[in-house]
Structures are given as structure tokens and as C-alpha cells.
Amino acid sequence: MPLSIATWNINSVRLRIDLVSAFLEAERPDVLCLQEIKCIEGNFPAGAFRKLGYEHQVVHGQKGYHGVAVVAKVPITEHIRRGFCGKDDARHVAVNIAGPGALPITLHNFYVPAGGDEPDPAVNEKFAHKLAFLEEMKGWLRGAETLGPTILVGDLNVAPLEQDVWSHKQMLGVVSHTPVETALLEAVRESGGWIDAMRHFVPPEEKLYTWWSYRAADWQASNRGRRLDHIWVTPPLSGRLLGLEVKREARGWNRPSDHVPVILRLAA
């Protein structure tokens, strides 16, 4: 059986549980990875997911901020939840999952720090934290960690390619697309031999966005988007990449997240 995995920065799962439920009823992915759930484990709306058939759940939460979760229709077991930069701020969880043909897969779900507004680590602690976080990812997600079938998803808060932003020239000094961030994220990907599954399906010369700011009066007309959400796979899964969907229409739903869901499908 094929396997479908969705990733979505939901920007408060309790506030937007109705949107998540509608998405799951319509799309029925086997696995949904959420970021920025903004609640502790005990306040996670587990019952709403169970009613939809997502009985398997792993939550790494924090009160009011950050937080990641994985819910699934298929069995999952927790693999690891890791703190970065000496902080326990609920930005990562990994699970084990039986993939197509019972292939065992490790699935990482990340929420990388946004980095604040000033792209200077000397004056902006948030930006320094983001760079340190990415450096730690680069040092860990390589070698033995990426030899087997592994998937990495999440809000990585970096738009690495020129066509991942609405204007490469105007965004060069804006956090998420500065040269230091884009080079570092690419170093993370390259050090582990990761394949950018989204760009496997959408050529690098084509525009591709997953986020549109709340600040735009008409996000669709201005279309000043960025690709902040990513799906990477290791080489053992490259031959199983079947399809990709970016659910752009979700940005226009009532009281939406500023991110939209992305779905990857893997062949049996």
C-alpha cells in the first residue's frame, strides 16, 4: 500500500482543530506532522484525532509556544525527542513507522526557530539561536542517522532557493532568506545526503511557496510567499517518491494558519 505523509505548521492546534479535522476528512493522509501546536501534551485534542481514525499519537508540547506532534492511522512508535542548543523547547520529535511493504522508516518532525527580525547574531539572540540550531542539525543528521530509510519534515523557517521567495533580490536581507541561513540549511541537507522531495517534483526554476504573511491585506493578490516548510528523504526512499501536493487553498480558509499543508506520497 502507498504511504502518504502530511506536514503543517498549524499555529495553535486547539484554535484550528476544525480546520485540521476538515483537512483530514478530505485528504486522509496516513500520517500528519504538526508544528507550532502551542500546547502541552495534556491539552492536545487527542480525542478529535481519534474520532477521525488517527489513534496513534506522539506529542512533544510546551505551554503557549512551539511544540510538535505526529498523529497517524498506521502504527507508530516514538523514536526520540531531542532538545537543541541546551534548550527543551519542544521543537523536535521522531517516530518509527512501517512504510510501504512494511519498510521501516524513521520520520523526523522539526520546528526550527524563526530567528527574529534582525539578521545579525551579534545583536539578535533569536537569530544566533537559529544558526546554532541549524549547526546542531548538520552535525547530527548525517552518517549512521541517514543511512536507512528516513524522512525529515517540518517548518524549517528557511527558504533556501531563489524561487522559494517572491523576490530573491528584495529578500536577501530578510530573515529566512539571508545567505548565511540558506547556505547553512543546504549544508544540513547535503551533509546527510538528503533529497529535497518538494523540488524533486517542482523544478528549482519554478516558484514554490508554503507560507504567506498575515500582514498582507490580500495574500493571494500580492502572492509574496516563501517556502518555509520542507520534506526531505534519504536515498533509500528516492525510488518510492510518488507525488506531492501543496494545499495552497488552505491559506484562504476561515481563520487560517499562515502556513499550508504539504503532502508527500510514497509508492509501495
Image (cartoon, rainbow, N blue to C red):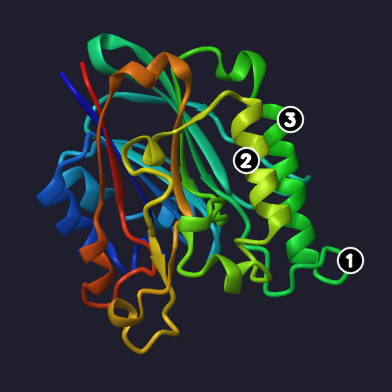
Which label is found at residue 153?
A: none
Please name the residue that numbered disc 3 is placed on: 139
Real-space CA distance between mark 1 and mark 2, rounded to the nearest whole angstrom:
22 Å
The type of residue carrying mark 1 is Ala
Q: Give above or below for 68 relative to 251.
A: above
Residue 84: x %, y % from top left: 71, 43
Mark 2 element type: helix
Can I make out residue 105 in this image? yes
Mark 3 element type: helix
Mark 1 element type: loop
Residue 115 left/right relative to 121: left
Q: Nearer the viewer, residue 247 or 104?
A: 247
Q: Nearer the viewer, residue 218 or 72?
A: 218
Which label is found at residue 186?
A: 2
**Disc 3: CA contacts within 10 A as few (<14), some (14-19) or many (>=20):** few
Locate the C terminus by quadrant.
Answer: top left
**Disc 2: CA contacts within 10 A as few (<14), some (14-19) or many (>=20):** some
> Which of pointers 2 and 3 indicates the residue nearer the eye?
2
Please name the residue that numbered disc 1 is placed on: 122
Residue 175: x %, y % from top left: 65, 67
Marks 2 and 3 in Cβ contact (< 8 Å): no
Residue 236: x %, y % from top left: 42, 14
Q: Nearer the viewer, residue 115 or 61?
A: 115
Q: Residue at x 33, y 44 (%)?
A: 202
Q: Give above or below for 230 relative to 239.
A: below
The type of residue carrying mark 3 is Gly
Task: Please tell me which of labels 2 and 3 falls first in the chain.
Answer: 3
Task: Please tell me which of labels 1 and 3 falls first in the chain.
Answer: 1
Q: Residue at x 69, y 34 (%)?
A: 138
